[in-house]
Image: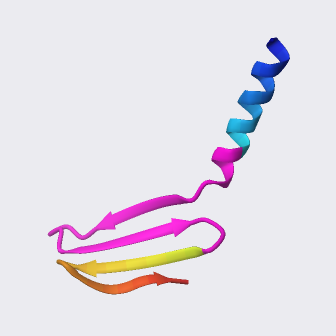
Amino acid sequence: MKRTSIICALLSLTLAAFAAKTETITSPDGNIKMTVTAGKQLTLSVTRGEELILKDCP
């Protein structure tokens, strides 16, 4: 039972390491938002208000 718990814990840590991580930065007035996603590729998206300026740009 203990061995199974250790294997499950290691598997979840490994899967979490490969998950895409996303960070969002917002301008002081909240009008411009930049989202950076680090997964297999590093991508960048930028919006101004409701207008999408860049979408998933590598």
* Residue 20 percent across, percent down from the top left: 57, 59
- Left or right: 31 in relation to 36: left
Quadrant location of the C terminus in the rendered image:
bottom right
**Location of residue 12 in the rendering, given as x and y in whole percent from the top left corner:** 68, 37
Which one is nearer the viewer's eye here, 27 or 6? 6
**Residue 23 screen position, x and y as percent:** 43, 60
Residue 30 is covered by the magenta coloring: yes
Q: Is residue 2 left or right of residue 55?
A: right
> Quarter of the image containing the N terminus?
top right
Q: How is the image coloured?
A: rainbow
Picture residue at 24% right of the left edge, 70% below the top: 27
- Does 30 appear above or below 53? above
Q: Total number of numbered labels? A: 0
Q: Residue at x 19, y 67 (%)?
A: 28
Residue 7, relative to residue 16: is it above or below?
above
| Residue at the extreme bottom | 53
The residue segment tinted magenta is 15-41
* Quarter of the view holding residue 50: bottom left
Determine the image quadrant of residue 24: bottom left
Residue found at x 28% / y 79%? 47
